[in-house]
């Protein structure tokens, strides 16, 4: 497990998961004030994950073809697919809690709370390891992770203020 986690943390997909997590967290915050049914929520997160992942691939194809002046190769497309899956995972991550709500394991309010805090935790986790791999000591890495999680917390606070 540790080796798989270390391999993942050293991969290019980390940035994509974080990017997707930010989108997923924003979606959680937006729909919380007037949530639809859990089935609709689950569909929105999956649909958003697919749309963002496809937009990622589309943008990369255009970028490569304009920048490098050739058609995208299979190897490049495979790499884009890996990145798209990582973004999609980040966006869809909160869906786990809405699925649990649909199965009556959690109530919907609890699912929203856990989705928000787990999103912040995920962003903080990646921020911590980014700092550690960049050579920061533990305390500095914890500060960096806390600051990044506070940015996400700011999004939640802004939403609460506006609604």
Image (cartoon, grey):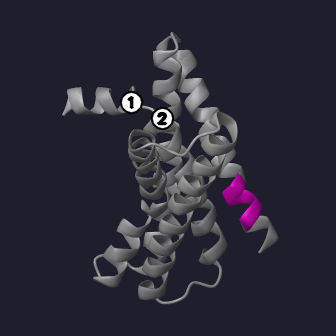
Residue 119 point in image, percent of width and height: 50, 53
Seen from the viewer's position, the closer of residues 89 and 57 is 57
Seen from the viewer's position, the closer of residues 20 and 62 is 62
Q: Residue furthest front?
A: 70
Residue 162 point in image, percent of width and height: 81, 70
Residue at (30%, 83%) from the top-left corner?
104
Stretch of the chain drawn in magenta:
155-159
Q: Secondary structure at mark 2?
A: helix
Q: Which residue is mark 2?
A: 126
Q: Secondary structure at mark 1?
A: helix
Q: On the rendered image, what quadrant is the N terminus found in?
A: top left
* Mark 2 neighbour class, 10 Å CA radius: few under 14, some 14 to 19, many 20 or more: some
Residue 146 visible in the snapshot: yes
Magenta highlight: main SS = helix
Residue 125 visible in the snapshot: no
Q: Residue furthest right?
A: 162
Residues at circles 1 and 2 in contact by the CB criterion of under 8 Å: yes
Circle on res. 9: 1
Q: On the rendered image, what quadrant is the C terminus found in?
A: bottom right
Q: Is residue 119 magenta?
A: no
Horizontal side of residue 98 vs 54, given as left or right: left
Residue 100 point in image, percent of width and height: 32, 74
Q: Residue furthest bottom?
A: 37
The number of numbered badges drawn on the structure is: 2
Seen from the viewer's position, the closer of residues 131 and 3 is 3
Image height check: is 21 above or below 112?
Answer: above
């Amino acid at each position: 497990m540790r080796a798989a986690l270390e391999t993942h943390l050293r991969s290019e997909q980390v940035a994509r998961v974080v990017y997707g997590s930010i989108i997923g967290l924003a979606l959680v915050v937006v729909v919380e004030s007037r949530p639809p049914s859990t089935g609709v929520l689950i569909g929105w997160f999956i649909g958003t994950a697919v749309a963002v992942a496809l937009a990622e691939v589309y943008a990369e194809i255009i970028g490569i073809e304009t920048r490098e002046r050739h058609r995208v190769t299979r190897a490049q497309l495979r790499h884009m697919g890996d990145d798209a899956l990582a973004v999609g995972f980040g966006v869809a991550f909160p869906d786990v809690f809405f699925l649990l709500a649909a199965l009556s394991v959690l109530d919907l309010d609890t699912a929203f709370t856990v989705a928000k805090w787990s999103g912040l935790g995920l962003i903080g986790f990646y921020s911590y390891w980014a700092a550690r791999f960049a050579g920061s000591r533990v305390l500095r890495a914890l500060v960096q992770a806390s600051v990044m999680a506070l940015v996400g917390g700011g999004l939640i606070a802004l939403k609460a203020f506006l609604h």
